């Protein structure tokens, strides 16, 4: 197996705190990730090329103004595979007390749902951004010291028919590698599929470095519906009011 290399920058703890970034940054191809998301780091199979890129990245890449020691290291081997956990992320009004429209996104992850829920809360506190209603933020105290009435832009997609991201929140999410410049829609309006990916990256910000997830898309043929030509019958009609 060939060696693989990544480029890292070790930032002084005080500098990291002042800059609002991680103590270890990873070069991702467009710049330095402000968060410790090693799985997004650009991988090199040639160490010499990695060293050349490191010298360039230290001077010119996004985030290069942050002082720190840069080096090329071998990409750590993946830890022993964890048992995959099946879960879903629900977007929209799952409780049905508003517009009553929602969409489920199913996924497999190597961490359980309890750890992922906790990571979401930690990412909210860490970034000052939430992807749910302000009422939920107050209940869980996810934005201590922040008044959403004065800074409503920190609430992303929490209100009816608001499927965009305010520029202030967008800058934070870009800096943390949660959204990517090339993925921002020309219209500024995000789809539920894009939202799923963005929220999972947001969660990943506070997960261990070996965290993985895979979206599962179901395509199933009905036994009795959809005019299949073999069994076109209605079952259970009387079960619904």
Image: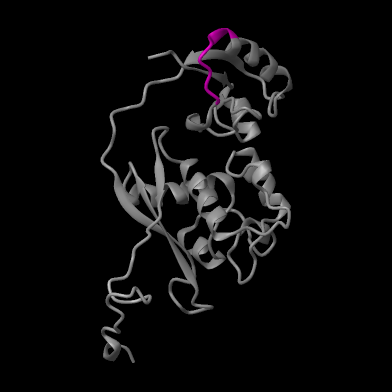
Residue drawn at the location 40% of the way across and 45% of the way down: 214
Residue drawn at the location 29% of the way across and 48% of the way down: 85
Q: Is residue 111 left or right of residue 205?
A: left
Nearer to me, 228 or 143: 228
Nearer to me, 47 or 226: 226
Residue drawn at the location 34% of the way across and 51% of the way down: 113
Looking at the image, is 173 positioned above or below residue 20? below
Give percent across and percent down for residue 127.
58, 45
Q: Outermost residue toward the top?
A: 48
Give percent across and percent down for residue 49.
60, 11
Model colouring = one colour
Query: Does the stretch in magenta take in 3?
Result: no
Give percent across and percent down for residue 164.
67, 59
Residue 72 visible, this angle: yes
Nearer to me, 207 or 215: 215
Stretch of the chain drawn in magenta:
42-48
Q: Is residue 221 left or right of residue 209?
A: left
Q: Quadrant of the N terminus?
A: top left
Q: Quadrant of the C terminus?
A: bottom left
Query: Does the stretch in magenta take in 46?
Result: yes
Residue drawn at the location 54% of the way across and 44% of the way down: 126
Looking at the image, is 184 positioned above or below residue 228? above
Residue 143 visible, this angle: no
């Amino acid at each position: 197996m060939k060696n693989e290399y990544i480029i890292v920058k070790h930032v002084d703890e005080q500098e990291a705190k002042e800059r609002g970034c991680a103590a270890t940054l990873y070069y991702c191809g467009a710049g330095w990730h402000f968060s410790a998301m090693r799985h997004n780091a650009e991988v090199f199979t040639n160490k010499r090329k990695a060293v050349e890129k490191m010298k360039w990245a230290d001077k010119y890449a996004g985030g290069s103004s942050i002082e720190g020691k840069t080096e090329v290291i071998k990409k750590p081997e993946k830890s022993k595979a964890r048992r995959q956990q099946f879960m879903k992320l629900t977007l929209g009004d799952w409780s049905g007390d508003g517009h009553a429209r929602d969409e489920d996104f199913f996924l497999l992850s190597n961490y359980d749902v309890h750890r992922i829920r906790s990571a979401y809360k930690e990412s909210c506190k860490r970034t000052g951004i939430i992807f749910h209603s302000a009422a939920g933020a107050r209940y869980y105290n996810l934005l201590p010291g922040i008044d959403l009435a004065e800074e409503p832009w920190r609430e992303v997609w929490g209100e009816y028919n608001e499927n965009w991201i305010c520029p202030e929140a967008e800058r934070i999410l870009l800096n943390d590698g949660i959204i990517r410049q090339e993925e921002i829609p020309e219209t500024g309006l995000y789809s539920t599929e894009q939202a799923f990916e963005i929220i999972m990256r947001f969660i990943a910000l506070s997960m261990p470095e070996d965290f993985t997830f895979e979206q599962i898309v179901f395509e199933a043929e009905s036994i009795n519906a959809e005019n299949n030509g073999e069994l076109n019958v209605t079952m259970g009609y009387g079960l619904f009011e």
